[in-house]
Amino acid sequence: MKKPTILLAFIFSVMFSTVSFAGCKVPSFKKFTNAEWTVGEPYYYEDSGLGFSFKFNSPNATGDLYVYDLGISSDLEKDWKQQFKQSISDIFYRYQKQAPDAELSSPRRVPDSIFSHLKLVDAAAFMVISKEPMEQLAIVTMGMANGCFHKFRYTRTTESFEKSEIIQEGLLDFSGIINSIHSALLYTDYLQ
């Protein structure tokens, strides 16, 4: 009689336990509900300190959620602030290498009212990238949860038009996807 009990206990623990990778809990997006966006399966990086990422897609924008600990697993404010600065620098570096003729605005803070209620976001910044005939709005966020860094990188591409419209529409769309991610994770044991 012990074998069925052990097997049942194993199946139960697998079904209801939280999966983790390199010290970071892997979120589940089974409860993700946003008709305009899709979310892919997690991609696990070979270097375990880099953790894993999820790709989000919509007709007008893309997003990537990166979860990692760099082997430091720290909730210290100085650490996530350093990661946030590095994330902004990475955007400039990427465009410098891939599109050197693109013009990038200085980073500006995303209004706190868009993300202050979210557990995964402690800071957010945006910049406008101009490269004829397209304009892009790039947003990067950084936060801590479960001892791991959570970076979300959002990019929306449009045909050139008024920068204030690009920013307004992009921030509205960004607010929708980041709130959908947050809501999906609230329905799991991820955000505790």
Image: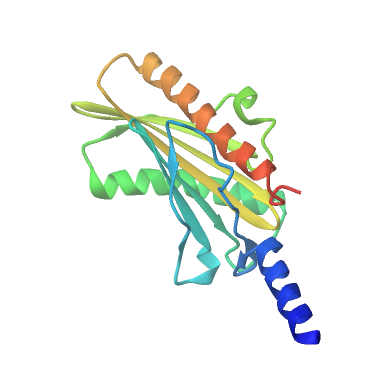
Residue in the picture at 26% in, 50% down: 97
- Answer above or below: position of 119 versus 174: below
Quarter of the view holding residue 155: top left
Residue in the picture at 66% in, 68% down: 14
Quarter of the view holding residue 45: bottom left
Q: Is residue 73 visible?
A: no
- Answer above or below: position of 30 versus 51: above
Residue in the picture at 60% in, 25% down: 114
Q: Is residue 141 visible?
A: yes
The location of residue 124, given as percent across then percent down, is 56, 35
Is the N terminus in the top left, top right, bottom left or bottom right quadrant? bottom right
Residue in the picture at 56% in, 35% down: 180
The location of residue 192, given as percent across then percent down, is 76, 49
- Answer above or below: position of 115 versus 166: below
Pick the residue in front: 57 or 139.
57
> Which residue ends up furthest to the right in the rendered image?
1
Pick the residue in front: 60 or 160.
60
